[in-house]
Image (tube, rainbow, N blue to C red):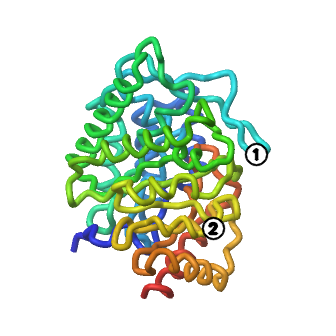
Amino acid sequence: MTKTLTKAPYRADIVGSFLRPARLHEARKKFAAGTISAEDLRAIENEEIRHLVDKQIEAGLEAVTDGEFRRRFWHTDFMEHLNGVEGYVPNHGYRFVGIETEAYDVRVTGKISFNPDHPHIKDFIALKEIAGDRAIAKMTIPSPNQFFNAGIRNEDIYPDLEEYTNDIIQTYRDAIKAFYDAGCRYLQLDDVYLAGLCAPKLPFADSELERERLIDLALHVANSVLEGKPDDLTITTHLCRGNYQSKWAFEGPYDKIAPKIFANEKVDGFFLEYDDERSGGFEPLKYIPEGGPKVVLGIFTSKKGELEDKVLIKKRIQEASKYVPLEQLCISTQCGFSSTHHGNLLTEEQQWEKVKYIVDTAKEIWG
């Protein structure tokens, strides 16, 4: 029997990325060196994704992803394949605590629109075929708000912010339709930019003085993209404060964005980072409408392999339920295990132990 999406997000859910297997790393090196073809690389990717999907189902997950196995970075691979956008190597990577990321970013080179031959559509179709009727195939893409990071917009091409905004909105509406037509019924928008608007000092935006204006713009973009969304398509937003080789980029509670974003963004669920003190407390969840979006508490960390204290986990869920009804809550890690091809600092065995631990914990709480 084919699974339905009546419960998505699920009690035990996942953000999306998984550690790349050694065989996949090796295949990418060979492809870069020209010793295997693109077809050879894709065949290896397909085999590793099949194994990954089997492992996710074996662990008890109801929604599965391709682990972002075909990507180098969680966001740039999608963005650079849109019309009017290119990837490039800047002088520096992003500054994380204790580390600088591999230098790679995107920039606007022309008018932005959706590319009907976008490779992620083909990638999703392959995932859906692999999952079959055993689980729901979940797709993850960067939020449209990622295009508002400083340095991406080309003001020679887009001197008018409103035109830039409208083109991004239309591009994402077209992207959502393309994924839906390909059979996608569970789509996640990864929004590090929105999480950045929580920080005491804005990490990516141009001006501290514009915080409220930027929050309003981010909400407008998200809700405009969601207009006309099919009823049987679940779309969630995932907020993260950086996830690169187990390092983080910034901190700050949700207080600054919650009154507008949590109360008004018309998604079906929020995946929220809550694995340490950097995210603050649960009180901002009071702005989530009762009976509205589900809240996936990222109270397990993907940055290290040690399993969390289950007593403390259950206590934290109980605390969150003071602000959002328990039946509206779910659990997951705060982010994926490998937001870039480098991966976090834990083993694949620890990764799967943690996923199974989350599933088992959810069963104990919700049955």
**Residue 340 picture quarter:** top right
Which residue type carries mark 2?
Gly
Q: Which numbered circle lies on residue 214?
A: none
Residue 244 or 237: which is nearer the viewer? 237
**Residue found 68% across the figure and 80% down from its top:** 309
Where residue 29 appears, x then y in whole percent?
A: 59, 34
Position of residue 58 measured from the top left corner of the image (x, y, whole percent) = 45, 73
The residue positioned 73% from the left and 36% from the top of the image is 100
Q: Is residue 21 visible?
A: no
Q: Is residue 269 left or right of residue 176?
A: right
Q: Is residue 328 above or below residue 277?
A: below
Pointer 2 residue: 281
Distance from Cα at disc 2 to Cα at disc 1 = 22 Å
Asked if residue 160 is positioned above or below residue 337 in the image, the reply reads: above
Q: Position of residue 159 (x, y in %)?
A: 43, 16
Judged left or right of residue 271, residue 339 is right
Residue at horizontal 38%, vertical 21%? 84
Q: Which amino acid type is shown beneath numbered disc 1?
A: Val
> On the image, numbered disc 1 is attached to which residue?
97
Residue ID at (63%, 67%): 281
- The picture places residue 79, in percent across and down from the top left corner, at 43, 33
Q: Secondary structure at mark 2?
A: loop
**185 left or right of 237 in image:** left
